[in-house]
């Protein structure tokens, strides 16, 4: 008997979601997205549920993202792209991200491990986001021909322009100290205290954000500064990444290339999908003055184009399936990604647009 990919329990009025594919770093399948949507809807209407918690099984990962390997395999097997699955996977995933952001009860995310891509979308829109020293955050999608989706583009669009572009384009990994500084998390609790925090939430069954804060505050501490990237490099990142075009960012990285940190960032950028770099920068600049709802509708337009005319499946093939790490990006350099091509990713889909209620 196959184990459940996601486990739902309710204990003393606390609904608990456990992402349960530890051997796949708890990557999200379409079935998991559907089940989480269904349970969140029913818990929201159920008066005996006071709050919801989400966690990952195992001690390494909260959630590494969407299971894009499985998605690609199934879409290709079905003669796509596109297919019903390539349309509905992202439709339902972004609907879930939005549901979490305006959930009517406290939504507590325990991101004690890798929290990347799709994992960001099922956690960081919640009312309480608790990280530990094991938390590793990234939006690495430009490496696989995508862009920071799941409302992550909206989160990064609200940050300082330079920091937001750096995280979106490089897919840089940051830890708790920097996440707290950027207000991407609400609390830091060391991993040795996460289990008693969970028990404490379940025994008190808080029904308001303030009550949840009072509990988490009892176990919170200051994150370690050792693995901060921002303490040493924040000004440099802002200098190189605050521009509104990829060409300007590349030029500035080249100009400052004697700096070791920037040299490494620039090397990373040169491996990303050129199309992804350009659409991601346009996305997060637009996102800075959009609502999350409108940004998710924009993301859905973008992701459908990435599947049909972008580098998404080729990126997944090269980085995660064949692992040759030699994607054949089309086009293969930033000069050949013109404004006309970029604009295609932002065109509406007519009847196929994402519709989000309230
Ligand atoms: C960029 C990404 C993802 C990635 C690697 C990237 C991503 C994702 C995974 C992933 C990790 C472990 C798994 C799995 C998928 O890797 O979104 O199935 O077991 O989910 O460079 O965006």
Image: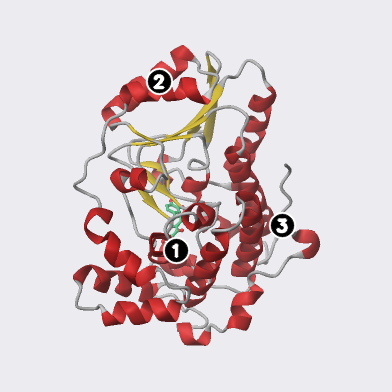
Instruction: Name the residue nearer the viewer: 151 or 238.
Output: 238
- Disc 1 versus disc 3: nearer the observer: 3
Q: Secondary structure at mark 3?
A: helix
Question: In which quadrant of the rendered view does residue 305 lie?
Answer: bottom right
Whole-angstrom CA distance, mark 1 to mark 3, is 22 Å
Question: Does 254 sit above or below residue 18?
Answer: below
Residue position marked by numbered label 1 in the rendering = 321
The picture quadrant for ligand 1 comes to bottom left
Residue position marked by numbered label 2 in the rendering = 215
Confirm whether residue 24 shows in the render. Answer: yes
Q: Secondary structure at mark 1?
A: helix
Whole-angstrom CA distance, mark 2 to mark 1, is 43 Å
Question: Does 249 sit above or below residue 158?
Answer: below
- Disc 3 versus disc 2: nearer the observer: 2
Whole-angstrom CA distance, mark 3 to mark 2, is 44 Å
Question: In which quadrant of the rendered view does residue 100 lie?
Answer: top right
Residue position marked by numbered label 3 in the rendering = 84
Q: Residues within 10 Å of mark 1 (few under 14, many from 20)?
A: some
Q: Residues within 10 Å of mark 2 (few under 14, many from 20)?
A: some
């Amino acid at each position: 008997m196959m184990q459940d990919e996601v486990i739902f329990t309710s204990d003393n009025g606390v609904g608990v979601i456990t992402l349960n594919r530890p051997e796949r770093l708890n990557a999200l399948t379409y079935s998991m997205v559907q089940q989480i949507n269904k349970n969140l809807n029913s818990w929201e209407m159920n008066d005996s549920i006071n709050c919801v918690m989400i966690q990952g099984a195992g001690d390494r990962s909260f959630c590494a993202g969407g299971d894009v390997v499985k998605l690609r395999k199934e879409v290709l097997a079905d003669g796509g792209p596109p297919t019903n699955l390539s349309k509905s996977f992202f439709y339902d995933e972004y609907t879930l991200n939005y549901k979490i952001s305006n959930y009517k009860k406290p939504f507590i995310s325990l991101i004690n491990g890798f929290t990347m891509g799709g994992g960001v979308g099922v956690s960081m829109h919640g009312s309480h986001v608790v990280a530990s020293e094991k938390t590793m955050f990234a939006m690495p999608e430009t490496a696989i021909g995508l862009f920071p989706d799941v409302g992550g583009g909206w989160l990064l669009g609200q940050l300082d322009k330079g920091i937001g572009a750096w995280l979106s384009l490089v897919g840089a990994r940051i830890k708790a100290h920097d996440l707290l500084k950027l207000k991407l998390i609400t609390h830091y609790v060391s991993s040795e205290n996460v289990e008693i925090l969970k028990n404490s939430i379940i025994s008190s069954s808080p029904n308001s954000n303030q009550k949840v804060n009072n509990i988490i505050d009892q176990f919170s501490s200051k994150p370690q500064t050792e693995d901060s990237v921002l303490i040493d490099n924040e000004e440099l990142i802002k200098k190189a990444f605050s521009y509104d075009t990829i060409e300007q960012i590349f030029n500035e990285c080249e100009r400052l290339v004697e700096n070791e940190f920037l040299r490494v960032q620039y090397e990373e950028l040169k491996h990303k999908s050129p199309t992804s770099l350009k659409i991601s920068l346009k996305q997060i600049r637009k996102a800075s003055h959009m609502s999350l709802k409108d940004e998710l509708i924009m993301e859905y337009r973008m992701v459908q184009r990435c599947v049909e005319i972008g580098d998404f499946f080729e990126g997944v093939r090269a980085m995660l399936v064949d692992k040759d790490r030699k994607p054949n990006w089309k086009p293969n350099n930033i000069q050949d990604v013109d404004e006309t091509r970029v604009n295609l990713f932002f065109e509406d889909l007519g009847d196929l647009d994402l519709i989000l209620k309230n």
